[in-house]
Amino acid sequence: MQLLFCSKNLTLKTTFCLNCLRLYFEKPDRMCACCLYIFLLRFVSPTVHYTPNPTMSALLRPLCVLLLGLLGVCLPVSSSSCRIRIPPHDQLARVARFVAHQVDWASMATISTHKPVVGQPFSNTFSVSDGPEGSSSGVPYMYLTHMEVSVKDLEVNPQASLSMSLAQTDYCRQQGFDPQSPLCAHIILSGSVMEVNGTEADFAKKALFSRHPEMIDWPTDHNWFFAKFNITQVWVLDYFGGVKTVTPEEYFQADPHRKHH
């Protein structure tokens, strides 16, 4: 079971919040902390009924807290859980690093070399990883082949733009944020794509294969190679007030893993 953010969309007529009610049918092994709290109440005392502001006896309160604590230790916690949260919106560089590490794929726009759209933007989907989970480098790595349509564009002009959004994770849906909402943090990276070799290729392999294990079995006759997105500018939209920019230096110096309380 994974602990999730509570949607806080509670009604008097439902036992669980609407978010968990929906997840029950989609992913029954997942439950938010609020509904786990309710579940424990009912487990400890079936006669206790949930209200939006439940009152507990002096005996039940510490017992539920203890059980929640034990479950918090024993259960795996997802990156979108209450123990790891998106950095504050005013810490732009950290938000950008956080988004870049959370997502597993990105939309990359190249300048097309293909008729009838030569010279026009051409967007395509690519699996990415900036490192194994919990080990962020900030550099988006990709596993490419020269047979791929966008890679043919990059051979002529390596400049590209890479877009990533927390809408690609569970976060925005759990919070009730539309993918286009500024509150659903997303970043746009400007730069170029370049092949990597040596020790950096070894790291790229570990970063990608740990999060995209299917890649290991992709056809060897496609002459796959590891590449990175060389960042020259970072654009961040994570709150109201318009898009903001972050320099590569600020981006790579930021720590996306610092915990909040």
Image: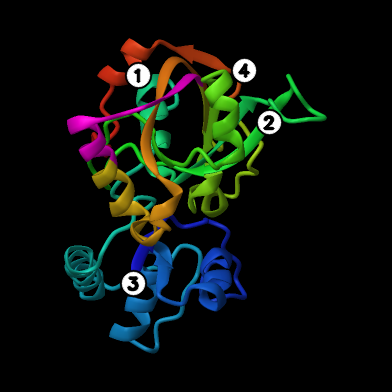
Determine contact: label 4, label 2, CB under 8 Å: no
Task: Please state if 158 lies on the left or on the right of 133 as rendered.
Answer: right
Mark 3: which secondary structure?
loop
Q: Which mark is residue 251?
A: 1
Question: Sequence-wise, which precedes: disc 1 or disc 4?
Answer: 4
Which colour style is shown? rainbow
Callout 1 amino acid: Tyr
CA gap, disc 1 to disc 2?
Answer: 26 Å
Callout 4 amino acid: Gly
Q: Residues within 10 Å of mark 2 (few under 14, many from 20)?
A: some
Q: In this picture, which residue range is highlighted in magenta?
A: 190-204
Determine contact: label 2, label 3, CB under 8 Å: no
Determine contact: label 1, label 4, CB under 8 Å: no
Question: Sequence-wise, which precedes: disc 4 or disc 2?
Answer: 2
Where does the C terminus fall, quadrant-wise? top left
Which residue is tagged 4?
Answer: 242
Name the residue furthest front. Answer: 221
Q: Which mark is residue 1?
A: 3
CA gap, disc 1 to disc 3?
Answer: 34 Å
Mark 4: which secondary structure?
loop
